[in-house]
Image (cartoon, rainbow, N blue to C red):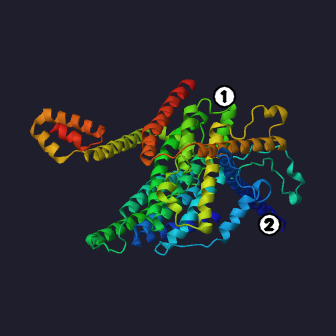
Amino acid sequence: MESVIKNAFPFVVISVGILLAFQGVLMIVAYTVLAERKVLGWIQGRIGPNRVGPWGVLQPFADLLKFIFKEDLIPDKSTKFVYFLAPFVALTCALLPIVVYPFGPAITTVDWSFLPYGLGDGVTVLPLTIARIDVGLLFVLGITSVGVYGIALAGWSSNNKYSLMGGLRSSAQLISYELAMGASIIGVVMLAGTLDLNGIIFAQIRSPFRWFIIPQFIGFVVFLIAAFAETNRIPFDLPEAETELVAGFHTEYSALKFALFFMAEYVNMFTVSVIGTTLFLGGWYVPGLSHIFEPGSIPYALVSHIAFIGKICGFLFLYIWVRGTLPRFRFDQLMNFGWKFLLPVALGNVILTIVIVYFLNR
Amino acid sequence: MVSTALFFLFAGFAIACAVSMVYHKNPIYSAISLVGVFIALSCIYLTLAAPFIAIVQILIYAGAIMVLVIFVIMLLNLDDEKPLNRLRFLYPLGGLFGIVLLAQTLFIYYAVMRAPSVPSDQSVTTGNTLGIGRAMYTEYLLPVEIVGFMLLMAVIGAVMLVRGLRIEPEVTVVSMGTGNLGDTAKVESDTVRSETGSDNDAHLVEN
């Protein structure tokens, strides 16, 4: 019995971690939707949702219930299997990167020997990351790039010309801007010397600038613009431009399947914000916090974690702000901007960083 | 034990996806099956402690190349009912290649069985990003350079092919008759045309 518990304990801990992380991210995502409606309301001189609960706090749950109980319409001539597969691909690929998010610094000062059956023996570190893998950054980029299948296949399988155009636009846009995004990240990877997300944060703490946004400002700007395009947000939301394409790739989707696409879009926003925070804004690192709390203690981890979430919320607010401010691009402008301006600038930044890193390491 | 079970799981998934890719009449289903093969292969790489190769497999093949393939299939809107009778003669050739591939597999199996089994060194960081980068830029620098050069040639070739579509046939004929001078003039006029968006006005002015 004791050995069974001892063997099962790591899996239980990991499962609890996964549950907490996914639940937390999904809650933040749900409230991003509410925040978007509220902030857009303020920008446009309206009030926004204020009926469900005080200040509209329960609005996300009301929306979710509505999505669940709506009628699920399936187009008659659609390719059924792919039509069902697409929203699941989109949401799965959006959610998978959560396992490598660096939620905070590892807790190292707690003595775990109070646990029964000797479960805490030899345990000294409680990392606030579910899986710390060597290629965490590439993992996030790879999985999110697979997410485009959800959109492309949704557009194709709906058997609707607007959906097809939306799916095609989305594939073209994602391929184009993925290049610029990857090139903008290379500068940070060269400065940090690692692809591990926690390793990049530690590299920033060791560097004299503390945040890589200072030496990599061009990279940050390119990353930010490419991030808006990658997540299909205004001003780059051509795949669902309602004046031209009704609703783009999800025109034929209703009820819970539409909700899955909707959630995938907001989880992707969150993912891009996490990457931006981790690469350019120091992740969970708060300058000077190690003078107040001992590094590795619970309060230190807690404050760092709150700082991490706060930086992400700043990114999400920027998304909403831009949505309320900027009009939409035309598609040829989008392509020209991506290939003829953003990619050369990102590559120039890479070359500049190579030269600087070479002379610094001499 | 667990790793063997995982290997059989992912290998079975890969083979099932490969078979479904070959046998599906609808090209979109074939493309999705191929993505399944790539994902299963990358899972096998992960169980072999090669995370970099695994992620790059997904990033390059599933994330970039197959997206382009699906993009093209969606644009062409192929008729999935029509059987491809035109390529019937390739069937025996395919069978021959299959037999060759099987023979190779058996030979590799035979060679691996005969080789002395050396326990793998756990401290080696071959699968890590750092190890791969170091090996690529020291020991295998020449192959990396050659591959990079070939890719550069492919990119330039692709650009030339796309630009070549803009040359109107009659202009080419005229310039071929006038020899060297005409060739220079042709190149110049092509540059002008591509800048002005190859509209008919440039063509008229030149004639």
Depth order, front residue of B114/A227: A227
Image-based side of A130 in relation to A186, left or right:
right
- Which residue bears the numbered disc 1? A209
The chain under label 1 reads: A
Q: Which amino acid does label 1 sit on?
A: Phe
Q: Is residue B79 above or below residue B163?
A: below
Q: Residue furthest front?
A: A45
Residue B180 is drawn in which quadrant? top left
Tag 1 secondary structure: loop
Depth order, front residue of A231/A41: A41
Tag 2 secondary structure: helix
Depth order, front residue of A220/B24: A220
Image-based side of A239 in relation to A68, left or right:
left
> Which residue sits at x=37%, y=44%?
B151
Q: In this view, does B12 lie above or below B183?
A: below
> Which residue sits at x=11%, y=36%?
B179
Q: What residue type is labelled 2?
A: Val
Residue B19 on image: x %, y %: 44, 71
Depth order, front residue of A142/B195: B195
Residue A155 on image: x %, y %: 48, 62
Residue A362 in view (yes/no): no
Question: Badge 2, how many Cα within 10 Å: few under 14, some, many 20+?
Answer: few
- Which residue bears the numbered disc 2? A4
Residue A344 on image: x %, y %: 45, 36
